[in-house]
Amino acid sequence: MKAAMYYGKEDVRIEQIEEPQLRPGTVKIAPAFNGICGSDLHLFHDGPMPPAPSDTDPHPLSGETLPVVMGHEFSGVVEEVGEGVEGLAVGDSVVVEPLMVDGTCPACKAGAYNLCEQMGFIGISGLGGGLSEHIVVESRWVHPVGDLPLDQAALIEPLSVALHAVKHSGVESGTAVVGGAGPIGLLVAAVLKAKGFTVIVSEMSTARREKAASTGVADVVVDPANDDLAAVVAEHTGGAGADVAFDAAGVAVVVEQLLSVLRGGGRLEVVAIHVKPVQLDITAQLTMQDRVLGSSIGYANDHEEAIELARSGKVDLAPFITGRITVDDIVEQGFTRLIENKDHEVKILVSM
């Protein structure tokens, strides 16, 4: 079968590989659409990093070394159902929660499998991937999406990341500020709107601000380089400040800005990955304001709710699809395009 194989930095090859075989407890899927994620960009442009294996050291759960099949944000159609599998049938439209976990570490036993000590990802760490003609997956990770279009279904994985962050914050209503309107920031805003929050999005890029406004996920969009974010938030909260803020930018100055617009007792939830340390004045910025600082990663038991948000129309995923390509063009029209035109792209979908 045809697949996109990841060999290392700037080395993705479209090759013919052996087709995976159905096993008891598994489901065989024909992938339909696969979204390109920030993790895929880092792997392509920067080279292998955990949870990806290297060409000499295998991932502890998959047992695979490079090359591996790429693709972890994908939808597809069930082709075969293995012995012992219930609730899934041939022809079902599905998405895959692309995780591999050991099931034995304290986090897994507590149900927080997104914190598994040996965490791996299908499509990054091995066990096949969405950028292939067929994949076999344990049935526990396969979620039916009903009549949700398969292109939109490919965004359920990042939507689940956003949903998990909103739920993890513990704030259920009020005014929320989202710092950063990249793919995850936009989806966090979409979840917040679906849950009834007033949403203020702060973003430097004109194109991304326009996307936040045109999709309706933001009630107010702010250019923090030219607008006074604190004044805008005060105007919309009667001077009280925001109830919750989400850092979806991964930049220290955004953390500073978001903390400055929180009310006393408000919460900052970090959903971005910071590659550099962030310095905070704990006493002034948190303690004396009785504020809470939290952070979240990935998802655990969130896919079904994310699917329902999309199926019900509370979150419209269609506007976030900004490109469709075939796997043969993934380097130039996928990885390169997302880097060079990142302000105008949200999610590029790849089909086989």
Image: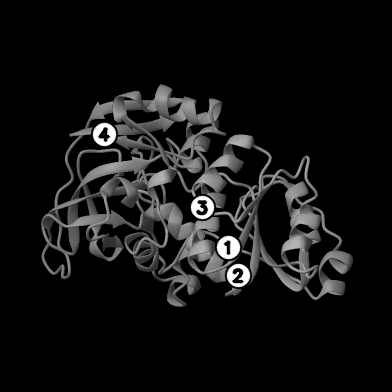
Q: Is residue 88 left or right of residue 69?
A: left
Task: Give the residue drawn at x 27%, y 56%.
Answer: 148
Q: Pointers 1 and 4 in contact (CB under 8 A)? A: no
Question: Which type of secondary structure does the marked residue at label 1 adopt?
Answer: loop
Amino acid bearing label 3: Gly
From where the camera sits, is residue 60 visible?
Answer: no
The residue beneath circle 2 is 169
Q: CA distance from mark 2 to mark 4?
A: 38 Å
Question: Which type of secondary structure does the marked residue at label 2 adopt?
Answer: helix
Q: Position of residue 163 (x, y in %)?
A: 48, 63
Q: Pointers 2 and 4 in contact (CB under 8 A)? A: no
Q: Pointers 1 and 3 in contact (CB under 8 A)? A: no
Out of 55 and 148, give the one closest to the viewer: 148
Which is more foreground, mark 1 or mark 3? 3
Q: Pointers 3 and 2 in contact (CB under 8 A)? A: no
Q: Is residue 270 left or right of residue 99?
A: right
What label sits on residue 216 in the rendered view? 3
Please report whichever mark, 1 or 3, sits nearer to the chain's N-terminal start: 3
Out of 143 and 223, give the one closest to the viewer: 223
Task: Give the residue drawn at x 38%, y 57%.
Answer: 99
The residue beneath circle 1 is 296
Q: Pointers 2 and 1 in contact (CB under 8 A)? A: yes
Please report whichever mark, 2 or 1, sits nearer to the chain's N-terminal start: 2
Q: Position of residue 124 (x, y in %)?
A: 40, 44
Please report whichever mark, 1 or 4, sits nearer to the chain's N-terminal start: 4
Amino acid bearing label 4: Ala
The residue beneath circle 4 is 3
